[in-house]
Amino acid sequence: MAGSSPLVSVILPAYRRADFVNQAVESVARQTFTDYELLVIDDASGDNVVAQYRLPAAARLLRRTENSGRGAIPRNDGIAEARGKYLAFLDCDDLWLPEKLASQVALLEAHPAVGVTFCHYTLVDEALDPLPAQRSPRCLPVNVLKALLNGNLIRTPSQVLARRCDVEAAGRFDAGLRSAEDWDLWLRLAGKTAFLADPAPQTLFRRHAAQHTADRARINQWSLRVLEKTGIWLAEEHPSLLPYYRRALAMQRYRQAKIQIADHAEPPLILSTLKQAVAGSPLTLRPYQGFVRLAMYALKRWAGG
């Protein structure tokens, strides 16, 4: 680990799963790049859990007295304490391969105009065995912001290394969001700086049964909130992207209508959602298909009494 002026600050939020936290910490310790500091932010797991953490002597443990209930707050706590030129985020579910930091630091050092780089990942199960369904590395588009409007290109924050100055300029994670807070930050960063994709799978992205995930309706609702927020600053800073933004917002509302149908919502609510989608982007065709889905759904409800 580095001394008082590390090049990289590793920010690792932790909550309850001491076994996962220790595996994540071990993956940091195995990095071939050593000029880093490790900040572990415990989100009120309790003394019994914290006592099980196996942290290096040089690591800094920050303990919250109340659980935040969201990922943005402990990450922001880490950013506030960070001393590094670069910020690396590692969720406690995930692990890094040994070359992760070395590869990404080299990329940002070689490209001073780039503010964010993200590596590829391998999707693994709880035992860290690769899952059958794997995605190909992202081919980064010329206009990253435009692509991000259609969805989050980055599956987990554990893939990212970013310049601390750019994260600070973008305003850190939005602590008011309970989901999609990472997508929100990547959008704001893409509005200010360049991104660079590293095709090497340097992160193990773990999926497991006990993982905290919100229901689809809630996730979609926060995703809508992110897009609505984005529209405010996009109109001033990148007005040429507004047609793409309106299309993305319409598609998000179409997905919301599909979720509402699956959740057996009342037809007037679904109709209102679809009307908003069409009003925002009349030339986007997919929301019109939602009216057909709604008609079939309403007929089934009527036939069922």
Image: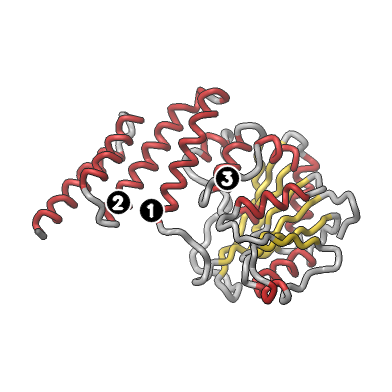
Q: Position of residue 295 (x, y in %)?
A: 17, 46
Q: Are marks 2 and 1 in contact (CB under 8 Å)?
A: yes
> Nearer the viewer's eye, disc 2 or disc 3?
2
Q: Position of residue 303 (x, y in %)?
A: 9, 57
- In the rendered image, which quarter contains the C terminus? bottom left
- In the rendered image, which quarter contains the N terminus? bottom right
Q: Position of residue 206 (x, y in %)?
A: 58, 66
Q: Are marks 3 and 1 in contact (CB under 8 Å)?
A: no
Q: Is residue 169 left or right of residue 291?
A: right
Q: Which corner quadrant of the image does residue 52 belong to?
A: bottom right
Q: Is residue 280 above or below residue 262?
A: above
> In the image, what residue type sits under mark 1?
Ala
Q: Residue tagged by mark 3?
A: 139
Q: Which corner quadrant of the image does residue 128 belong to?
A: bottom right
Q: Badge 1: few (under 14), some or many (20 or more) residues near its Cα, within 10 Å?
A: some
Who's the residue at 51% across and 64% down the image? 212
Q: Badge 3: few (under 14), some or many (20 or more) residues near its Cα, within 10 Å?
A: few
Q: Secondary structure at mark 2?
A: helix
Q: Is residue 119 visible?
A: no
Q: Secondary structure at mark 1?
A: helix
Which circle marks residue 217 in the picture?
1
> Nearer the viewer's eye, disc 3 or disc 1?
1
Who's the residue at 90% across and 52% down the image? 4
What whole-number distance in Å separates the C-alpha atoms at marks 2 and 1? Answer: 8 Å
Q: Secondary structure at mark 3?
A: loop
What whole-number distance in Å separates the C-alpha atoms at marks 3 and 1? Answer: 30 Å
